[in-house]
Image (spheres, rainbow, N blue to C red):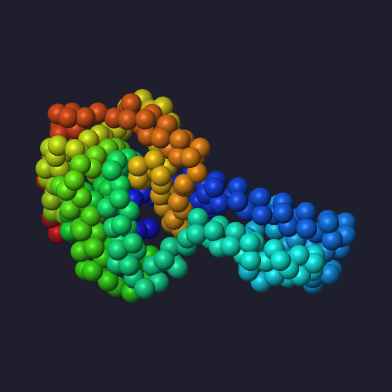
Amino acid sequence: MPFGTSSTSPDPSVSHQAQEAREALGARLRGFRKDAGFASGRAFAVATGWAESKVSRLENGKQNPSEADIRTWCVTTDRPEQIPDLIATVRRIDELWLEWRRQLEPGAEERQKKALPVYARTKVFRIWHPTLVWGTLQTAEYAAETFRQVVDYYEIPDDVEAATAKRLERQQYLYRGDRIFNVVLGEQALYTNFGGPEVMLGQLDRLLAVMRLPRMSLGVIPRSAPIGIWPGNSFSMFDDKLVLVETYSAEFSVTQPREIELYTKAFALLKRSAVYGTTVRDLILAAIQHFDQMPRD
């Protein structure tokens, strides 16, 4: 995945928001079908030449219809005037759930470039990652290693150098304006080995430096700390307007206020388990000692 905002979600098939929209769309399609006199999905399947299972999946929100499906459905049910509205709905659902392969097709740099306007607008950042260092705090060497994995995993054009440079542009916001950065990492993030001990030593030293920034709150959840919520769902919050969650296959955005409130609550629970200040410094120094003792290639 394009490491740096978050990682795997507990349900990597679809976001709750996209699923709700899909189910609402399916209910509308079912209503059109019944109003047109098709008493069953089987009858509608015969009229369209589709499999009955496809009709069921579309009506129950188990499958996102294509734009061609929408046109066929509306013409068959004599609702052609609904085509533009329903196609717009389908496109909105697609926007909520973006496949990485499609986003990364031109390379990783373009995806990093798209993040910059979001960072420029955001005043308060809330970042949770249990297993790796947040992209904006990464060194060039650590970031380059994550992008090498992205290039290999998704089999995309190798633009590691350009993507790394674009990611490092985010760091300007650590020093400009009055933005507030609330970052919580799992202790594992200090040990997940990207690039070997030299790269990790540089990255850990970078964390020691950035934790002293005046508007940076860097917390770490020790591996044995009591925790109030399942920690595996990493995410990035931008003010109270947007949450981004990444999985191995896709990225989805959360914009509905009631869902954002859930992430706000989750972040507050995670913070309760985190340590700060000199305790974080001690954890980082312990990780430095660990990598310092590792054999070099």
Q: Quadrant of residue 1?
A: bottom left
Rendering coords of residue 189 (x, y %): 27, 43
Q: Depth check: 28 or 161 in front?
A: 28
Q: Position of residue 138 (x, y in %)?
A: 21, 52
Residue at 79%, 72% (x, y): give it: 49
Q: Is the residue 99 above or below the residue 132 in the image?
A: below
As drawn, 110 above or below 238: below
- The image quarter containing residue 78 is bottom right
Residue 195 in view, yes or no = no
Q: Quadrant of the C terminus?
A: bottom left
Rendered residue at 29%/32% (across/down): 221
Whether residue 99 appears in this view of the structure is yes
Residue shown at the point (42%, 31%) measured from the top left: 265
From what the image shows, is residue 120 above or below residue 51?
Answer: above
Please tell me in which quadrant of the rendered image residue 59 appears: bottom right
Query: In this figure, what is the number of numbered marks?
Result: 0
The picture places residue 84, in percent across and down from the top left corner, at: 63, 66
Tell me residue 286's x, y (percent). Answer: 16, 36
Asked if residue 33 lies left or right of residue 111, the reply is right
Left or right position of 135 against 96? left
Name the residue rendered at 29%, 41% in the picture: 124
Between residue 216 and residue 53, name the one nearer to us: 216
